[in-house]
């Protein structure tokens, strides 16, 4: 059930099968991101893959001494490119792998193009999704629905991605979907269709309890992506944006060249792997330890290398030092930037009110706090709009709804038109009319008990009170209590036992908060394995875009969010000194 | 009310009693039902209910604080457990999910091949047809044949399309006329205009035809199927005479053909070229890979050896480890050099290679650098000779401590048992025959002290004393015919025996240790040595003495010997000596001489290691040098040492091993040599070497190190070789410096590449320092 491992195995197999010798990996745009999520450059270099080329790139040279491994999505364009390539082969031998089911006619036309007999392998390897974490995958599709209905191309891509996932994990599941969402039903049907059509492929060894695919719709819980996050991974995505494990720091002026874009991958970065689910305060102290550790190992710069022994020690330790300095400077920069944004945008206070809006039902106090925050000049228009959105979603039908007044406040604050329009767009996307289950005042007995218990315990951490709706849904699913009338099965058969292997797919995108929830559920429920997927992994920005029906990221990205900050000195030393102070001063959780 | 509340906290799903609605006081079956009751019946009083619930919460909070606290504690425990155990009773971290098999896949290769085969056959036939015709067209002497005859031959090869059938050029569509004449393709017979006509030169033709002949002759590998297929197919038809190469470039020397035929031929030519051409980069790359494989094989072996040596074990010899290290380092250098060569391939050529080629080269270099960095990191350094000695000491001491602990333990037990036995035996006797008992007890008690006293004069060892006592006990018991007692006593005796063996071994170890120390100090006079030898003789005699005794004792109980043997094995194991050696040694039957045997073997090991180390000093110096001659010298030196018959002698005689250790010239009298060694040592310590003492920091470090370490000197500084050695050393220093400079340059390159300017600065500083040093050195050597 480990999706990262599944894709990695596919890629490793491709490389192994091609035998020894210099290799080039020929990919398309999507497979490039798929591979880059599971393999680092240095890792793949060790397997003798030295060049990475795009099949559509015209700037490729003929290099007959290279073997080509082609990993492509089976699209019409790719097949056409490959035909051209085979007619005039640039490499000595071709190993062709498609990431999904390819039709027979395409195979035929490829075969006919291979007059020089350079193709040694044609296979389908179903690595057709982006493996984010072992239990999280994404398809990197933004704006997959137009209104309430699927965009045809996106629907077929989503179906492909989801079936590829099932194939790569060797699961032939029963399917449940969210009844209130038309798109969930459509997708479920499409997946079922593929399973029926390719029944030979889906003929896996039967397990005692069949796996379960649960298809949900984002519109049922529009709250979760609107909240500020405080765990490392989620926070980085919310404030800086993670794209295929990459973080763009180029908007931080004065940043050194090699930190423009950093990679955060739990596969290769131990610190990240250990800290991605920890909250900001814990990371602050961990990063301090990391730096102390590092400073011990750091060679003294001004030290004269007096003897051969000194020299040798220096040269021998240098690579290790360099490796570590890479990790340290990366995380120090990222956490430094995070803490700067937090204090600059007054996020602690904002987050507190957000959580209050999301988790509590005290209208007047919430309204009061919001009004206060909207007056605060430090709160950005982005955050202000976000607060109003949360308010609009929660108190949509409240008797003393004062949304118009808040909208006026927004206008007075100088929040631009496009943000204000988003408020109504969000309500339309995820408002009460659309929701199948109640987000705020749950009618379900179990959840009331939960809320009740929470009230008893008091709030442990004001910034992380919110539990995404997904937690409830999955919890019930695991206990076999998820209502059939809300989440019906597709087809006649139903699951009598409690499910063990669960794949949840969220149309409209999952969030890292939900990834954390699923991670915790995995850890606390014996015998249960849950994989979470979504058309994308959201942060507030991307959620704005999809809910507003925008298809491309375009110019709406609030630059102010990524407003840069100048480090006065590029020297690592200064960086460390600076951030060791700043990360330690803003630790609201350390109590 | 309050009493009805606690249950839900335990498990809301199971407790089903006493749920009263706070508003209508209706008894509901469960908390759920209570809640739904609220929702249904009192939804209008929403606020009110919540308010009431809240107040209840306040109450319950106090009551339940303890319970909740415990609950959360439990959870925390479970959490921490899960962090470390992937299979805790809770769930599993997704990172630790059990490995899964490779996902589904489906091959289309057979389909693909089927379609391709159909296509390929067609294509291959086309090409072959053209080649055969080309052969026919070029098989006669074109220059000396009349053009009419040529035309006739050409027409016979392929039927020409008749002129009337083709009014327009099929390629460009121009109308044929008197000015735009028709031309026939000699290869397929089709018609085209002059503009569209292509020509095949004779050299090209001969190249194509001869290549296919070669392919037939050499039967190229079946993998390159298109070519071999063509070759074999053509083979049945081809009967080609030699092609005359005509140099004059008349129109007749070229063969007219259409574009399509020319295109096919050119493709074929390209294939031929590619098959024969192996680019430089491939050759270098193959070498590079070979080196990497070698490293992958050797490095683990080395790491194992080095780990063992660093732990002070004697399983591997330091000398061998050094060999291995040098070997590995050389391969690394080779990798470095090869990848550098690949990096700079074609950089000086004009035109510059394609950027992708350059990228490929860069990537290969990068991966080689990564490889070296990663593997070199794991390559721990070996202990220096001195350090190794220390480590060995430490380990030995540790072992001894362990042994002593064990010895004390057994001794304690022994005493206890003895006491126990005495009391028990007396008790048992008491119960049996009172009058007889009195006599025996008295007898044994009375006899015992005298025997020990008498023994004490001879043997100081209390253990031996005890053994004697017990033997006499046994005798008495036997005489008294008390089998039980005899057995017990025998048991006791055996334990004592073991104990004694252990002690003996310890002594041996201690002795060898002391000797090792003495060797190191090189202060021991021959006299002392002789004394030692005498001492040892005494020891031997002593153990001999014991052997007779223990043999005696073996007569009584045979199985005891086996136990003793076990014990030896244990000791041998602890000592990390060669167990097989001891087992196979004939004297292993008797424990005490075996101790001496162990001593001997111990000394042998010490000796061999010493010799290894002696040569290791040389190693240390030219470890990183590239000069092959020095290495050879070093190896021969080792060979000499290891095959040195004197070594065995020394081990056997055991009186002069220390001298032999540092004896490079075996024909020398050990005594003389000793003096010499001492002289050189003295020199090394007292006066810094004139060749080195010029204030050069590296040299200084070196010389200080050397002088502080007399063994390095004594081992290599044979008075006859001094000059050579030193000049050699200088070469080494230079080599080392150069290498370091190279390393640093590589790092600078790397750092620049990734834009870490501060690092570059530091490194450049270092580089400058090094260069300055190197310049100084060169000046000096020139002087």
Image: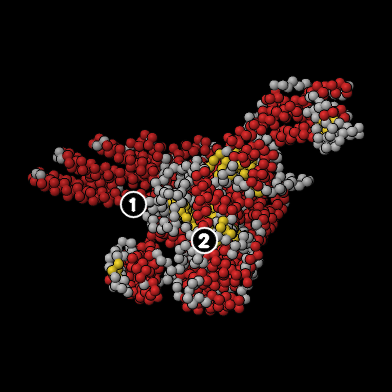
Mark 1 belongs to chain: B
Residue at image coords 82%, 29%: B165
Which coloring applies here? Answer: secondary structure
> Can you tell which of label 1 and label 2 is closer to the viewer?
2
Q: What is the x, y in percent for residue A553?
A: 63, 62
- Residue that appears at 65% across and 54% down: B750
Which residue is depicted at the point 50% across and 46% down? A195
Using a 10 Å C-alpha cutoff, classify the residue at mark 1 as few (fewer than 14 neighbours), some (14 to 19) or many (20 or more): few
Front residue of A421/A463: it is A421
Note whether residue A532 is visible.
no
Q: Secondary structure beneath disc 2?
A: helix
- What residue is shown at x 35% (from left), y 41% (from top)? B568
Q: Quadrant of residue A382?
A: bottom right
* Screen quadrant of the N terminus of chain B: bottom left
* x and y, in percent, of residue B110 in the image: 58, 35
Instruction: Name the element at disc 1.
Output: helix
Relative horizontal placement of residue B240, taking residue A367 as reference (left or right): right
Q: How crowded is mark 2: few (under 14 residues within 10 Å), some or many (20 or more)?
A: many
Q: Are marks 1 and 2 in contact (CB under 8 Å)?
A: no
Q: Is residue B689 shown left or right of residue B164?
A: left
Q: Where is residue B697 in the image (x, y as percent from the top left)?
A: 63, 57
Q: In this view, does B78 lie to the left or right of A67?
A: left
| Residue ID for mark 1 | B405
Does B290 sit above or below residue A242?
A: above
> B19 or B274: nearer the eye?
B19
Residue A195 visible (yes or no): yes
Q: Which of B243 and A229 is in front in this view?
A: A229
Measured as percent of width and height from the top left, residue B306 is found at: 51, 47
Chain ID at mark 2: A
Q: Residue tagged by mark 2?
A: A218
Residue A46 is marked as none
């Amino acid at each position: 059930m480990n999706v990262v491992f599944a894709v990695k195995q596919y890629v490793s197999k491709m490389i192994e099968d091609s035998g020894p010798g210099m290799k080039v990996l020929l990919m398309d745009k999507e497979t490039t991101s798929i591979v880059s999520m599971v393999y680092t450059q240095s890792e793949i270099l060790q397997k003798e893959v030295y060049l990475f080329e795009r099949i559509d790139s015209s700037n490729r040279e003929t290099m007959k001494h290279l073997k080509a491994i082609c990993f492509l999505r089976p699209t019409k364009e790719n097949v056409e490119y490959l035909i051209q390539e085979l007619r005039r082969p640039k490499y000595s031998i071709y190993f062709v792998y498609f990431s999904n089911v390819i039709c027979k006619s395409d195979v035929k036309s490829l075969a006919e193009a291979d007059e020089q007999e350079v193709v040694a392998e044609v296979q389908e390897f179903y690595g057709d999704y982006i493996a984010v974490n072992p239990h999280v995958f994404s398809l990197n599709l933004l704006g997959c629905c137009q209104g309430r209905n699927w965009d045809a191309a996106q629907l077929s891509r989503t179906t492909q991605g989801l079936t590829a996932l099932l194939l790569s994990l060797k699961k032939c599941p029963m399917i449940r979907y969210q009844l209130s969402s038309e798109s969930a039903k459509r997708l479920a049907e499409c997946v079922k269709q593929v399973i029926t059509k390719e029944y030979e492929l889906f003929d896996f060894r039967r397990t005692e309890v069949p796996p379960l695919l649960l298809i949900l719709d984002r519109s049922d819980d529009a709250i979760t992506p609107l909240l500020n996050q405080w765990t490392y991974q989620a926070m980085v995505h919310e404030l800086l944006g993670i794209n295929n494990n990459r973080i763009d720091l180029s908007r931080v002026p004065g940043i050194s060249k090699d930190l423009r874009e950093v990679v955060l991958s739990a596969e290769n970065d131990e610190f990240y792997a250990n800290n991605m689910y920890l909250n900001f305060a814990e990371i602050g102290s961990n990063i301090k330890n990391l730096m102390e550790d590092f400073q011990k190992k750091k060679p003294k710069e001004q030290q004269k290398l007096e003897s051969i022994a000194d020299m040798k020690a220096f040269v021998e330790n240098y690579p290790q030092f360099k490796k570590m300095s890479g990790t340290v400077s990366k995380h120090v920069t990222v956490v430094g930037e995070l803490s700067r944004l937090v204090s600059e945008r007054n996020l602690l206070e904002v987050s507190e009110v957000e959580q209050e809006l999301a988790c509590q039902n005290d209208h007047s106090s919430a309204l009061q706090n919001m009004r206060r925050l909207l007056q605060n000049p430090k709160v950005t228009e982005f955050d202000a709009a976000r607060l109003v959105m949360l308010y609009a979603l929660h108190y949509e039908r409240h008797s003393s709804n004062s949304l118009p007044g808040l909208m006026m406040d927004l206008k007075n604050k100088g929040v631009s038109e496009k943000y204000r329009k988003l408020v109504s767009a969000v309500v339309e996307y995820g408002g009460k009319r659309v929701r199948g289950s109640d987000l705020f005042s749950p009618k379900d007995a179990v959840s009331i008990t939960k809320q009740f218990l929470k009230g008893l315990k008091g709030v442990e951490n004001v910034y992380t009170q919110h539990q995404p709706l997904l937690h409830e849904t999955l919890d019930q699913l695991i206990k076999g209590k998820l209502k059939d009338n809300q989440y019906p099965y597709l087809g006649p058969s139903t699951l009598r036992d409690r499910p063990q292997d669960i794949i949840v797919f969220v149309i409209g995108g999952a969030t890292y908060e939900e990834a954390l929830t699923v991670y915790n559920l995995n850890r606390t429920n014996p015998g249960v394995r849950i994989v979470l997927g979504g058309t994308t992994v959201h942060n507030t920005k991307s959620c704005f875009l999809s809910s507003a029906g925008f298809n491309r990221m375009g110019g709406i990205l609030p630059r102010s969010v990524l407003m840069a900050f100048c480090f006065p000195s590029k020297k690592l030393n200064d960086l460390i000194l600076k951030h060791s102070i700043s990360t330690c001063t803003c630790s609201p959780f350390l109590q | 009310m309050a009493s009805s509340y606690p249950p839900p906290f335990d498990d809301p799903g199971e407790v089903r009693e006493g749920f009263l609605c706070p508003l209508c006081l209706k008894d509901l079956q469960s908390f759920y039902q209570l809640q739904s009751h609220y929702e249904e019946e009192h939804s209008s009083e929403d606020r009110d209910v919540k308010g009431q619930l809240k107040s209840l919460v306040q109450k319950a909070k106090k009551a339940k604080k303890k319970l909740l606290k415990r609950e959360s504690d439990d959870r925390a425990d479970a959490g921490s457990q899960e962090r470390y155990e992937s299979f805790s009773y809770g769930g599993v971290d997704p990172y630790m999910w059990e490995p899964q098999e490779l996902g589904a896949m489906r091959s289309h290769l057979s389909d693909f091949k089927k379609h391709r085969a159909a296509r390929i056959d067609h294509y291959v036939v086309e090409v072959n047809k053209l080649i055969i015709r080309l052969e026919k067209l070029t098989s006669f002497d074109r220059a000396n044949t009349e053009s009419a005859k040529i035309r006739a031959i050409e027409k016979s090869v392929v039927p020409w399309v008749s002129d009337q059938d083709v009014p327009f050029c099929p390629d460009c569509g121009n109308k044929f006329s008197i000015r735009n004449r028709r031309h026939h393709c000699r290869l397929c017979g089709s018609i085209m205009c002059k503009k569209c006509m292509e020509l095949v030169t004779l050299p090209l033709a001969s190249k194509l035809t001869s290549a296919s002949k070669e392919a037939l002759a050499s039967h190229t590998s079946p993998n390159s199927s298109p070519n071999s297929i063509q070759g074999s197919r053509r083979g049945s038809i081809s009967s080609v005479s030699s092609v005359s190469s005509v140099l004059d470039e008349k129109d007749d020397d070229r063969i007219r053909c259409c574009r399509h035929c020319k295109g096919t031929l050119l493709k074929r030519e390209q294939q031929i070229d590619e098959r024969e051409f192996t680019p430089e980069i491939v050759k270098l790359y193959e070498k590079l890979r070979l080196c990497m494989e070698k490293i992958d094989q050797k490095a683990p072996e080395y790491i194992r050896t080095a780990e063992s040596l660093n732990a002070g074990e004697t399983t591997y010899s330091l000398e061998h480890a050094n060999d291995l290290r040098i070997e590995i380092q050389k391969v690394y250098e080779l990798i470095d050099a090869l990848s550098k060569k690949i990096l700079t391939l074609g950089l000086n050529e004009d035109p510059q290679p394609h950027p992708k080629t350059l990228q490929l080269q860069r990537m290969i270099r990068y991966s080689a650098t990564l490889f070296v960095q990663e593997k070199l990191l794991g390559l721990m350094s070996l202990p220096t000779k001195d350090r190794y000695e220390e480590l060995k000491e430490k380990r030995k001491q540790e072992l001894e401590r362990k042994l002593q602990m064990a010895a004390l333990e057994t001794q304690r037990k022994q005493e206890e048992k003895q006491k126990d036995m005495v009391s028990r035996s007396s008790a048992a006797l008491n119960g049996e025959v009172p009058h007889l008992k009195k006599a025996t007890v008295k007898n044994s008690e009375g006899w015992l002290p005298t025997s020990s006293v008498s023994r004490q004069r001879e043997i100081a060892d209390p253990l031996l004393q005890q053994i004697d006592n017990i033997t006499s006990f046994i005798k008495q018991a036997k005489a008294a015919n008390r089998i039980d007692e005899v057995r017990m006593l025998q048991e006791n005796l055996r334990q004592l025996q073991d104990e004694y063996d252990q002690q003996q071994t310890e002594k041996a170890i201690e002795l060898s240790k002391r000797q090792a120390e003495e060797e190191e100090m090189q202060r021991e006079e021959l006299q002392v040595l002789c004394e030692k030898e005498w001492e040892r003789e005494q020891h031997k005699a002593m153990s001999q003495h014991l052997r007779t005794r223990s043999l005696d004792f073996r007569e009584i109980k045979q199985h005891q010997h086996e136990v003793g043997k076990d014990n030896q094995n244990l000791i041998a194991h602890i000592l990390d000596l060669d167990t097989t050696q001891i087992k196979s040694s004939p004297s292993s039957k008797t424990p005490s001489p075996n101790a001496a045997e162990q001593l001997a073997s111990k000394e042998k090991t010490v000796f061999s290691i010493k010799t290894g180390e002696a040569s290791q000093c040389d190693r240390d110096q030219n470890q990183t040098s590239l000069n092959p001659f020095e290495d050879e010298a070093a190896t021969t030196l080792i060979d000499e040492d290891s095959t040195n018959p004197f070594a065995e002698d020394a081990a056997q005689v055991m009186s002069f091993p220390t001298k032999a250790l540092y004896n490079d010239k075996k024909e020398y009298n050990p005594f003389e040599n000793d003096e010499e060694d001492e002289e050189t040592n003295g020199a090394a310590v007292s006066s810094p070497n004139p060749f080195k003492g010029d204030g050069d920091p590296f040299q200084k470090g070196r010389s200080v190190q050397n002088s502080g370490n007399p063994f390095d000197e004594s081992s290599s500084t044979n008075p006859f070789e001094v000059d050579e050695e030193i000049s050699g050393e200088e070469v080494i220093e230079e080599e080392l410096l150069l290498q370091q400079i190279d390393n640093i340059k590589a790092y600078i390159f790397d750092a620049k590449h990734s834009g870490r300017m501060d690092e570059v600065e530091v490194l450049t500083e270092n580089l400058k320092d090094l260069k300055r040093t190197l310049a100084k050195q060169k000046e000096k050597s020139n002087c």
